[in-house]
Structure formats: C-alpha cells, structure tokens
Image (cartoon, rainbow, N blue to C red):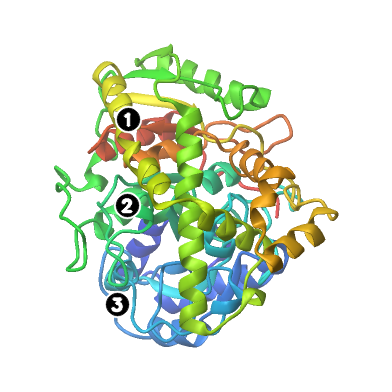
Amino acid sequence: MDPADYATRDGLELAALVASREVTPAELLAAAQTRSRAVNPRINAIVRTLDGIADERAAQPLDGPFAGVPFLLKDLGQEYAGLASAGGCRALAWTPAAQHATVVQRWLDAGLVIFGKTNTPEFGAKGVTEAELYGPARNPWDLGRTPGGSSGGAAAAVAAGILPVAGASDGGGSIRIPAACCGLFGLKAGRGLVPSGPEASERLGGASTDGVISRSVRDSAAMLDLLAGADPTSAYAPAALERPLLEEVGREPGRLRIGFVSSSVVNPSPHPEAIAAVADAARLLEQLGHEVEPVATPYDDAALARDFLTIWFVNVAYMVREVKRQTGSGDDGFEQDTLIMAALGRRISGVEHCAAMERRHEQIAAMARFHERFDLLLTPTLATPPPRIGQFDPPRALRPLAAGLLKTGTASVLSRVGVVDRMISENLGWVPFTQLANLTGRPAMSVPLHWTAANLPLGVQFVAPLGGEATLVRLAAQLEQARPWAQRRPLL
C-alpha cells in the first residue's frame, strides 16, 4: 500500500479496504512496519515488536470490524499470552503473561493485527513516559518534549503515523493527557464499562480503564463498542449503552449547556496557552449553538488531589510488594521514584486510605449537582504545553539522600526535605484536571482543538455525567467536523 495513502486513513477506512479486497492485511502490516522502522528510532514509542506473530496473523483469514488493521498494545495491563507485560519495570521485563487480557482478546476477535507494545512509565505512575527500562518516548511534534503518559508510547506512535489507533489506558488521565500532548482524540469510558479481566475485577478501585488513542472520533467510538460489556471476572455489569457509539457519530448533540473552568487550586496560574485553549473552545461551542459560561470549580480540587495521591501511593506500594513476591526481585528491580512512592504509600494507614476512598462520594455528589445544571464540564486537558524530556527529573543532590533513606527505612524524612511536595507539584501541577473523572467514575474526553504559537498541541477536556459517553461522542464528532484535526501532522 502506498505509504502516503496509508497515513491518511483511519482504522475503519483501512478495514473497509481489506473487506473490499483492495488491500490485504499483510500489505497494511508492511506499511505500519515500514513507517515504524523509519520513525520509531527517533520517538521510542514501540518497545517490543511482535513481527513474527503479526506476519503469521496477517496471512490468516480475519473477521471483525477492524479486520486486518495494524494495532499496538500498551505495555501495561494489556497482557498478551506468552509475552512479558513489563509496565516499564525492570523486575517484570521477562515475565510472560499466562493469558490474554480480556480487552486484548476482544481486539483480536475484532480482527486487529497486533505487531508490538508501546512505551509507558513504570506502573503507569507518571504523566510522562520516561521509564529507565526503555528510555523516554518522544513527542513527534517536538522531539525534546514528552508525549505525555502513561500511554505516551501509544500517542507518539499514532501521531507519527505508524498506525491510526492504538491501545491505551487511563487511571488518572493516561489516555487524555497523551492525546492532548500529541494532537489526538482520547476518550475515557465511565467506570466499569470496559472490563479489567481476567486478572483483575477492577484496577485502582475502579478508577482505571482500558481504551484507545486515535486520530478519528469514529475509531474511538467503534473501539469502545467492541470493548464494552462485563466479563465473568467483572465486579458488576454496567448499564448497557442505548445504541452503539459508532451510531452516535454524526447524530446531532442538541443544544448543550456547558460550564467551563480554566484554573485549579493545584495550579492556580495555568499557562496562557491553556487558558486560551478553553476560551477558543468556548467560542467555537457558542458558534455551534451551545450555551457556554464560566463557573466556579464545582468540586473540591485540593481535596481531590490529596485523595488521589493517597490512593495512588498505596496502590504503588501494593504493586511493588506483589512484584517482589512474584518475581523474587529486590529494590534494584524498580526505579527510585517508584520506591519513594511505595515508601510513602506504606506510611499511609488503612484508615487514611479508606477515608480517601470514601471521600470520593463527596466529589461524586458535587459533580452530580453540577450536572443537574450543565450537560458537560469543560477544562484544559493540560495546564501547560507538553513539558520537556527530563523536566521532572529529581535534583541530583536529592538522589543519594533518597537512596540512603530508602535503604535505612526512614523514608518519612522525605516529606520533610521537599521530595513529596516536588512529586505532588510536578506530577499533578501540569495536569490537575484529569483525575476528577477517574475518582468519580465519569466518562471524559480530550479533544485536539488548540495548538500553541510554537505549534504544540494542547487539548481541551469535557467531563460528562454517568452514562454520558454518547453525548461526548456526538459533541466530539461535531467538533471534528467543525475544526478537522486528523490531517494536521507533525513534520517527522
């Protein structure tokens, strides 16, 4: 297939070409592999290739809505039987998965041709993708900047034209953040709609979900259609969608009432480009006939940030313990920042963790009150343009100190020498808006409507009430038509 033609198609278009026998899965795979060989050495998006497996699959008869389309898995929580799912962690780099994750099996059932796995930070615990195991992923719009995280490798691969849609997941913004950094569309489903099985019933207490990052709204809609629905290991069966989300693409969203905020207690002074992104989106929405108005932040964002990090640190502590138990690895199997988060997590009492989990109800109730008046909440996805690679590396002087404190088990001192404050401000300061949807279980999306004066993407986020995926898709498709972004590409 002609590389230029391949690069202009979304996943459903490529599948239609396969169905009409205008192109074969092998030809599509070759196009993806050729593009990967050309650009991946510069962006480090793909960290594990499955060329032999992919070549064999592409030669077989395939069926499904994405039959023959090349696809990449995130190297975290999207297990492929017999292959390692390292999650950016040295201790897991060579531990094979016993079985396919439910979402991976559903992607295979949809006819996708999986040819690799993408870069992610260790355990997906950061908004940037700079794991020591594989090195940093780079943003195709500016190779000195991050593509975001934790699905940074997926976003970089899609933005660079290796493929039109890639596997991703979102526990605190990890679909929406990299989508915003790379000029792509990112939709996070509501709690429980996509199963986490068979190894987990819910990840991160239901805050995390699998999905994709794509160039087109309809690809994301069609992907969520095939991923949605409980499996036997699910904690519960969520309410079914009224109709397939793909059928919502092109359907009028109606006149929506949208409230917007541009700042946060965590970052009261976002970059001017982030404020401009929301103002520009508000103008476009008004031109499309929607009611848009500024509102006070409808939830306690300071408390939400504290509770999110409390839950996150405890979760990291649990993961480090489990990986050590399963692999026999010591501290040398993990990055120092991960060990610091784990140490902080172990200091949190069970009562404190339970309180943080229970306080989610206060945020849920606040959003329920907001959604009685407004259909959607609009915010920047990012409070700043994509940061530079290494921008959040700890000062060299702190590393020996942190190593000594970890070794002696006196990590509580870290909170008194500024390490904790640094982790909070740097991990959440540039992305203070995305965790809301995870802790409250609401669906949300990042739409690539804004580019900075330096030609860097910076998306805007919409948060919907429970069951609001259809509203999000209808609005996203309307915005996509009003201000197309799919053919806006980095010069890579």
| Dot placed on the residue nearer the N-terminal end, 2 or 1 | 2
Q: Position of residue 89 (x, y in %)?
A: 58, 71
What residue type is disc 3 on?
A: Leu
The residue tagged with tag 3: helix, strand or loop? Answer: loop
433 lies above or below 171: above
Lower sequence index among marks 2 and 3: 3
- Depth check, mark 1 against mark 3: the one in front is 1
The numbered mark at residue 435 is none
| The one of 150 and 446 positioned closer to us in this rendering | 150
Residue bearing the label numbered 3: 62
**Which residue is identified by label 1?**
362
**Numbered mark located on residue 206 in the image:** 2
* Residue 69 occupies quadrant: bottom left
Q: Amino acid at mark 1?
A: Glu
Secondary structure found at label 2: helix
Most distant residue in the right direction: 397
- From the viewer's perspective, is residue 361 above or below residue 77? above
Residue type at numbered disc 2 = Gly
Q: Nearer the viewer, residue 382 or 370?
A: 370
**SS category of the residue bearing label 1:** helix
